[in-house]
Amino acid sequence: MENTQLNDIRQSSHLTASSEAALSHSNELDGLRLSPHFKLSEFLNLEKHPDNLPTPQVLFNLKYGCQYLLEPARREVGAIIVNSGYRNEAYNRQVGGVRNSQHLLGQAADIRPKDPQQFQRLVDFLRTCDYTDQLLTGPGWLHISWTPFSSPRHYIRIGYYK
Ligand SMILES: [Zn+2]
């Protein structure tokens, strides 16, 4: 009985310590910006996925997407909400992402305009943008990807996600 209690305490203090560490890490990351209007923390979902930390290569890729797609799109439609950006393997598996998802590289984001009325304008802007690799739209949100190291494919599928 005592042993069990001790184990419980050990486990709960371990959990507290590790979640505190993740929290402070997430606070440190909170100030980092990828571009003038996009914070790194918006692309990581660390509250739900504390281990989802970017490599330098992922950071580079995310910055590229912000600079060439998301900031220009924001100028068209106002504030943009990032539902999902970078995903490590575990996170990607958890949300049922495809195995070769560009989210794994920091080369994609699922986004929506803060003002839902701007959705069509956002789609219209991204479908004609030179840097668009894949654009797959769903109801009120879309998946946009970019390819910093090769030519974008301009693969557009409207209504891809039901
Ligand atoms: Zn996506």
Image (cartoon, rainbow, N blue to C red):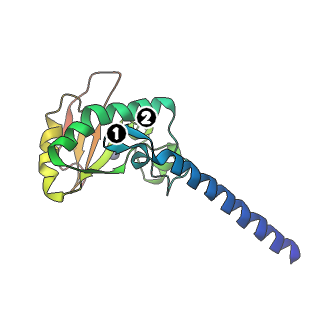
Tell me which amino acid carries mark 1. Answer: Ala
In this rendered view, identify the residue nearer to me: 98 or 70: 70
Query: Hey, what amino acid is under mark 2?
Result: Leu
User: Which residue in the protein does label 2 denote?
Assistant: 105
Q: CA distance from mark 1 to mark 2?
A: 8 Å
The answer, for residue 16, to whether it is visible in the render is: yes
Locate residue 8: give its quadrant: bottom right
Image quarter where the N terminus lies is bottom right
Q: Are marks 1 and 2 in contact (CB under 8 Å)?
A: yes
Q: Which disc is residue 108 wearing?
A: 1
**Front position in the image: 99 or 37:** 37
Is the CB–ligand 1 distance for label 2 below 8 Å? no
Residue 36 placed where, x, y %?
Answer: 32, 39
- Residue 125: x and y in percent read 14, 40
Residue 124 appears at what percent x and percent y? 12, 42
Categorize mark 2 by other alpha carbons within 10 Å: few (<14), some (14-19), many (20+).
many
Which image quarter: residue 15? bottom right
User: Looking at the picture, does residue 17 appear above or below residue 57?
Assistant: below
